[in-house]
Image (cartoon, rainbow, N blue to C red):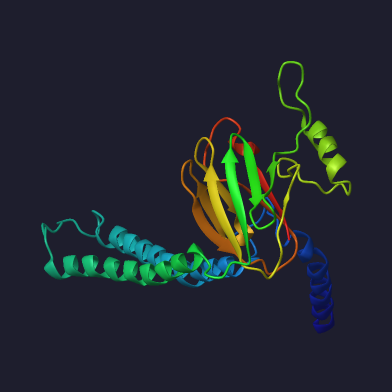
Amino acid sequence: MKTLMIRVLAALTVWLAATLPAFAFEPKPTDLGLQAPATPNMVRLHHFHDNILLWIITGIVIFVFLLLVWVVLRYNAKANPVPSKTTHHVGLEVVWTIVPVLILLGIAVPSYKLLFYLDRTATPDMTLKISGYQWGWTYSYPDQEGLEFNADIIRGPKDAEGRHATPAQDQEEINKYIPDGKGRRLLETYNPIVLPTEKNIQILTTASDVIHSWTIPAFGVKKDAVPGRTNETWVRITEPGIYYGQCSEICGIDHAAMPIVAYA
């Protein structure tokens, strides 16, 4: 039995080693939880979610569940034929006012620290400016002599009636630009952005028409792109790879056709 367990664990270790790098930074339909972090920003978001929020939420759910069970068993008509007419209990009202305040304070303190950390970097090594439009992204590198380009979704040609291509036609078009056959339909763009690793990257977002939202989950970045305004955040990519995101602000009929691809 012991030998069998060792073989099973060895086989599982080999399988994980072979498969984890392939999907470390891309979402899968069966994934649970947050995406694997690729920046210090996302590492801190993971910590805040897993080690603070999750424990608080779990405690609240367990408490409310046990309270409901106690109420059902203790105060049903059979167990309590003569109901109490009590309307106030000063001690109980003080407790249920103070305890939620303490819980909110316990969330607020690390939350504000995290928000300030995610806000901006004092020492950017480069700047990436992003402008959303209906429906795509314009990227510019101000530090590289104003390099600028659009990144639109890769799709097959529309038919004579203006209808979008079929999934097979989309994939055929994608394979022209990603010949290894691993291009992800509805996630690839004609001009993906390329970013360095281990550099502080200042990110500026704006929009030319309506509000969009530039989001890459593995980076821990979700920053609104608002017309007439420039918002700022930053990332420091620690792992090379291909990262996918989407516009996360409903911006019109082709909102779902605004993918984001970053090569690092």
**Residue 22: % across, % down:** 79, 60
The residue most toward the bottom is 2
Residue in the image at 83% along x and 76% along y: 10
**Residue 109: % across, % down:** 37, 71
The image shows a total of numbered marks equal to 0
Closest to the observer: 13 or 211? 211
Quadrant (top left/top right/bottom left/bottom right) for the N terminus: bottom right
**Residue 180: % across, % down:** 88, 49
Quadrant (top left/top right/bottom left/bottom right) for the C terminus: bottom right
Closest to the observer: 235 or 175? 235
Query: Please, is residue 151 above or below residue 20 in the view?
Result: above
Query: Please, is residue 183 above or below residue 40 in the view?
Result: above
Closest to the observer: 176 or 124? 124
- Side of 90 where 187 appears, left or right: right
The quarter of the picture where residue 170 lies is top right
Query: Please, is residue 7 above or below residue 146 in the view?
Result: below
The residue most toward the front is 145
Residue in the image at 25% along x and 56% along y: 78
Q: Could you tell me if residue 34 is visible in this image?
A: no
- Side of 137 where 88 appears, left or right: left
The quarter of the picture where residue 217 lies is bottom right
Residue in the image at 58% along x and 42% along y: 132
- Side of 213 where 17 appears, left or right: right
The residue most toward the top is 161
The residue most toward the right is 179
Closest to the observer: 101 or 263? 263
The quarter of the picture where residue 199 lies is bottom right
Q: Could you tell me if residue 187 is visible in this image?
A: yes
